[in-house]
Structure formats: structure tokens, C-alpha cells
Amino acid sequence: MLKYIARRLAYTVVILILVSMSVYLIFSVLPMDPAALSCGVHCKPYIIEANRHRLGLDIPLWQQYWNFVRGLFVGRTYGEGSAAFSCPAPAFGYSFSRHACVTDLVKEAFPVTLSLAVGALVLWLIMGLTLGVVAARFKHRWPDRLATGFVLVGTSLPTFISGLMMLLFVVIKFNLVSPLDMGRWVSPFDNPVAFFKNFVFAWITLALAYAAIYTRLTRSSVIETSSEDYIRTARAKGLPEKLILRKHTLRAALAPIVTMAGLDFAGLLGGAIITEQVFNLPGLGRLSLRAVLQDYDLPTIVATTLLAATFVVVMNLIVDLLYAFIDPRVRVA
Amino acid sequence: MSADVAVNDAPVQELVSRTPNQLAWERFKRNKAGLIAAVVTLLFIIAAFGAPIITGLWHLDPEKPYVDQLTPYGMPVGGSGISWAHPFGIEPQAGRDVFAMLLYGSRISFTLAIIAGVATIGLGLVIGTTVGYFGGWVDATIGRFSDFLLSFPQTFFIVALSLPLVQRVEATGIAHGNTARIVVLILFFSVFGWPAFARIIRSQVLSLRERDFVMAARSLGASTRRILFRELMPNLWSPTIVYLSLMLPSYLAAEAVFSYLGVGVQPPASTWGIVLSDSINYWQEDPAYLMIPALMLIVIVLALNVLGDAIRDALDPKADR
């Protein structure tokens, strides 16, 4: 087991390095000059060159990458002398257009994205698992048909449309959240009610889309496990149906669901661009969308992209280890 | 022998032999929802690609501002401007006919989704077949590469890279404006799309390559290329067609999303996503302008999903959903 973990960990580190290198490389060969982008329309060439030097963009690419990685661990200082400014570790870079260390921008946005992802995850797991189990137990009867209909609608409804409809025809129409509060981050510890009101509609929107997929997955997973021999044994022993479902069927059926939930959750942690944009939530997704559309703020874009990729890669590792923990057969492979 | 006799003694019954395709077609015809979905899809596609003819028959011009249909404030007369002459109403401010806008816009969306879908399938088919057939280090390398590709956050990449990549494409002179944006979106969709399909094909090929007909072909001295393209690929068309039919709706929706976010196709083109993002500004005065493109997009995505499910059920009767 230890050997498996070590091998898997090493693989993850390699992937992370490769991903960070390619993200860095892709963004630095773009036809845009971050130094020129750092100072508006009325810019003089000498300012651009000075900024290029201050941002450390006048050295070879591999050195830039090295500085970037070093910055992540020990922080980074830009410029020299009295004009110097520094970002403490982990430094993702400095955003000239926002006049802030990217790490601070990320720190501000992350709680929003995290709240969005966690709330949606809880909601869609409850919905998906319940509907899936009910559909499997009443296979080919009306609850199953209803669930199938829900799956079809849920998978066909693009989130930006369901989100827009929810926002316009429910939230704004019935004045459920005052426009002034919308899109403002409220900590759940300061004001739980405002926090809940801010997020609940975005949770529902996201959860609807995911719950449909999880209903389908749970249903087929439960049906498949129900035909296993050990379930028949449990039934032959005379165990009550509810106990079989809870202790035998669900436990086995959950493995693929946990895997998928982990990966979907990781995908959302990087920023739910669409939902955040529709509901005006200042999370990581909106941070990067704004960075792209307003002024192509490269350091922010590199940071958010890298962060999103890191979540996926790390969650892949966690899910794999978890799977090996649940299912001993995986360890041998 | 006795079985033969029994058959001969039985009253002569018309035995019609049917190919698997005919059987699949018969199963498909029995699926009512699937048939309706097929008709709806067909109507949408005809409307999209026949946009010039249909708007011509309706005496509509997609670019003409129907200013006489607007109030002095730039809003359509009577709220949405829906009338016999303008069945979907009039665009606020600019005054274009919404019916013509959406037809021409859907032509762009369908073109993009179909090309991206075929490219995804093509890449996945070729790579999946090759990898599955050769196995070994080819399989391991490409497997790792697709893992690597899948660890990139796709939406982030498309959002972040579409702008500079469009400039790149424009600089090469291949395409300009929206054509360049469409090219970039197709590139993104197919580059990030193939690994999932290649995986399905790979597992199919793994079992197919051990079958007798492949060995027969090999012993007859068939070249590797012949085995790959002539022996293996014809056996893969049913997962291919199923996957393609499920890929189209997701690409249609994706195009709408990126246009809505402002990183896809840009106005004055009028795909569903673009019209939707404009219509938010007028949702209270002119809700029809918002609902019509939203409903169209929902209906076509739903129809394509139902159609895809029906095709899968017809081709693979064992799959019990």
C-alpha cells in the first residue's frame, strides 16, 4: 500500500510540473506582450521596457519559469531599490492592472468559489442519490419514469439558461435578494442568512445539472450491484430489504459515485465560470473571465488556470487513493 | 439432422432474413419519442441550412432594420413586435427580425457543432483504433498524454486562450472575424474532446483484435493499414454514431455558452447564446425576446439527446437503461 501511494504521489508531482510548465509556456508564446499590457493605451516605450524589467520578463523563458516556481515557495520581489514591491509566498505573480499581488486576488475569490462548490455538491448528492436509489428500486415503474424524465431535462438544460431563468424570473421578479447585496461576499460566520440567500439559487442551478447525471449513475450502479451474488445471499438470509440496500448494495454502488463526485467537485473548485458569471458571484471563475475580457491580465489568468488544473490533478490522486482504500483489488494493479 | 426434418415438415413460413442494420431500424421505428425527436431535429437542421430560402419566402431580410416596428424608445411595437410578418418579433434597438436572426445564427451553431463533432470522432477513432491494436508503449504513451490533457481545466483554457488564438489565426490569414473564432472553437472542442471517445474505441478494439476474422485477415497477409481501416473500423460504427449523436447537443450548448460569456462568436452574428446575452437587457419589457432563443436551444438539445438515446437503444438492445 505504501509503495502504491508513493508511486501515485510521484506521478502526481510529475504531472503537476508538466502542467505548470505547459501552462506557463502556452501563455508566454501568446502574441501578447504582458509588459505592454501592463500600462494602458497611452504608454511610452521606455515605460514598457522598465515594466518588462521590473516584472522579470527580459530574461530567458526558463529563468522566468524558475522565478515563478521559486516565487510560489519563497515569495517574490519585483524591481529594485525604493521602487521595489514584493508579494509574499505563495506568490503567483503581480497584476499590474489591479495593482495587487495575484495571490491576494485569489485569496479574496476562493471562499466564494468554495462556498458555491460545497453547497452545490451537498445538494446534488442528496438529490442524485435519493432519486437514483428510488428509480432503481421501482425499476420500470412510475418513479423510475419520473426520474428518467428528470435526467433528460437536467442533462439537456444548459446551466446558463436555467441560471438566467432562476435569476430573472425568481430572484429578481420576487425580489428575494436585494440587488445591492447580490454579488457581495458575505462570510457565513458573520451573517449566515445573507450568506444563504446569496448562494442558494446558484446552488440549486448547479445542483440541478449535476443531480441529473448522478441520478443516472446511481440508478445503474445500484441495479448492477443488486444482481450480484452476495446480495442474493443477504436476501436468502432473510435480511430486511432496507438493511440490504443500506449495508450491502449502497456501499458497493457508492465507489464509482465517490470517484466522480471528487472529480466534479475539483472541477468546480477551480471556478464555476458560468454560474458565477450569471449570478454575479465574485469567485475564481469570474476573476479569470474578467481578467480575460477587460484587459487580458496575464498573471491572473496564468494563476487561475494553474490553480484549476492543480485542483483536478490533486483530487485525482485523492480519489485514486480513496478507491484503493475501498477496493483492495486496485492496489495490485 | 432431425432438426432439419422438423423444419421441412412445418408449414412453409416466409422467412425473411434481416441484417443487423434492418433490425436496428425496426427497433428505432418502434420508439415514438425517438421518432418525434428525429423529426424535430430534422426540422431544425432544415431551417438552419435553408435559412436564406425560408426568410426569402417570408419576405424577411436578416440585416434590414425594421425601424417602423420600433417605438421612439427603440423597443418593439406592442412589447415584442410579434406579428404574422415577424413571427418571433423584432430585436430591441437594432430592429432586426428575430426569426431571421435566429435561423441564420443556428446555421453557424450547427456548422460549428457538426464539424467539431466529426473532428472529435475522427481523431478519437483513428487514435483509439491505433492504440488499441498496437498496445504496448504506444498505448501507454498516448494513455498518459490523454490523462495529461484531461487534467487541464477545459472551460478555463477556452476562455483564457480563445482571444489570443483568434488573433493568431487572423495573423496567418486563414480566416478573419467570426470565421476565425469558429475555427478556434472547433479546434478547442476537438482537441479536448477526443480522449474520452478514444478510450471507448480502444476498449472495443482490444476485444475485436483477438477475434478470428482479424487473425484470418492477418494470415492472408493483409497489411496493418488494411486490418485497421478495413477490418476493425467497420465494426466500430455503432459506438461512433451513438457518440456523435450525443456529442452534437453538448457542442451546440457549449457554443451558446461561450458566445454568451463573450469569448465565442461575436455580434452582429446572432447565435442563440449571443441573442440570449443581449436579451437580458430587455427581459422585463420584452420577455419573448429572451424566451424564444432559450426555448429553441432547450428544445434542440433535448431532441438531440432523446434521438441519441434512441439510436443507442436501437443499435445496442442489450443496454438496459
Image: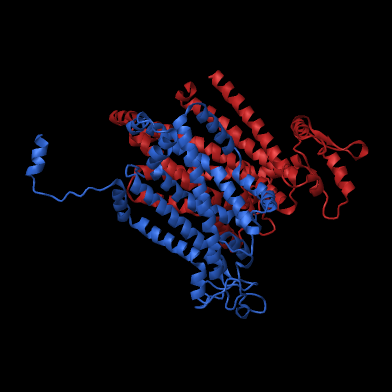
Chain colours: A red, B blue
Left or right of residue B270, residue B311 in this image: left
x and y percent of residue A72 in the render? 74, 32
For the residue pair A199 and B276, the one nearer the viewer reads as: B276
- Outermost bottom residue: B68
On the picture, is A303 further left or further right than B191?
A: right
Q: Residue B262's quadrant in the figure?
A: bottom right
Quick one: A74 or A139, which is closer to the camera? A74
Quadrant assignment, res A254: top left
Q: Is residue A104 above or below residue B32?
A: above
Residue located farthest toward the left when viewing the structure as drawn: B9
Within the image, what quadrant is residue A121 found in? top right
Residue B55 vs B319, above or below: the answer is below
Q: Give the percent coordinates (x, y) of residue A180.
A: 70, 58
Seen from the viewer's position, the closer of residues B282 and B260 is: B260
Residue B233 at x, y percent in the picture: 41, 40
Where is residue B116? Give x, y as percent: 53, 50
Q: Residue at x 54, y 58 (%)?
A: B109
The answer to whether residue B3 is seen in the rendering is yes
Which residue shows up at 56% across the image and 62% down it?
Answer: A169
* Residue A189 showing in the rendered view: no
Looking at the image, the residue that sits furthest to the front is B221
Question: Farthest residue in the right direction?
Answer: A82
